[in-house]
Image (cartoon, grey):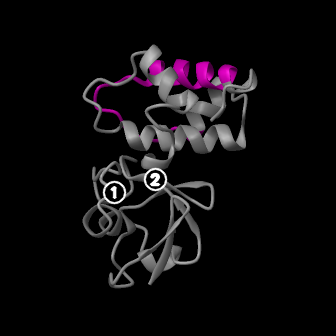
Amino acid sequence: MELNINGQSRNTQAEPNMPLLWVLRDELNLTGTKFGCGVAACGACTVHVDGQAVRSCVMPVSAVAHQKIKTIESLGTVDQPHPLQVAWIAEQVPQCGYCQSGMLMAAAALLDKTPQPSDADIDLAMTNLCRCGTYQRVRAAIHRAAAQMKKGGAT
């Protein structure tokens, strides 16, 4: 099966019902996407499929075979981080860091759809769980990134 991941064509011999998360991590060595709960509740495994934030732990790989998949590895680079990554650091969002890749991907999908989100927009979109409880910092970081992107700081 051929997949479009981070703009590249990648082949997998995975069974059609294998969750996308395990194809990404175990077969393609894209380990930024994390396993959290396995039931789509926590969001640690969030990736983009055709621009939508989805939980990869319950998404059969066959369901995304002809769609564009983006993982945290495509969000930014060391030399050119995404405004969300810069804001995450500035607002000191990460604590343990485990949920962060999923949080960032959910936030990126939100900003793609709603470039200047309200607090209510953020609260509706950010359903990811963070055991460290940095939700206020997440909200502040999203607002900071949105302001930077409005000024033309998007990557």
| In the foreground, 25 or 78 | 78
Residue 18, placed above or below residue 132: below
Asked whether, in this view, residue 88 is left or right of residue 100, the answer is: right
Q: In this view, does 31 lie to the left or right of 111?
A: left
Q: Name the residue under label 1.
A: 30
Q: Residue at x 66, y 32 (%)?
A: 154
Q: Give the range drawn in magenta.
A: 125-148
Residue 140 in the image: x percent, y percent? 54, 18
Q: 25 or 110, which lies in front?
A: 25
**What label sits on residue 71 in the rendered view?**
2
> Tags 2 and 1 in contact by the CB under 8 Å rule?
yes
SS for callout 1: loop
Q: Position of residue 118 (x, y in %)?
A: 69, 25
| Mark 1 surroundings within 10 Å by alpha-carbon count, few (fewer than 14), some (14 through 19), many (20 or more) | some
Counting the numbered discs, the total is 2
First along the sequence among labels 2 and 1:
1
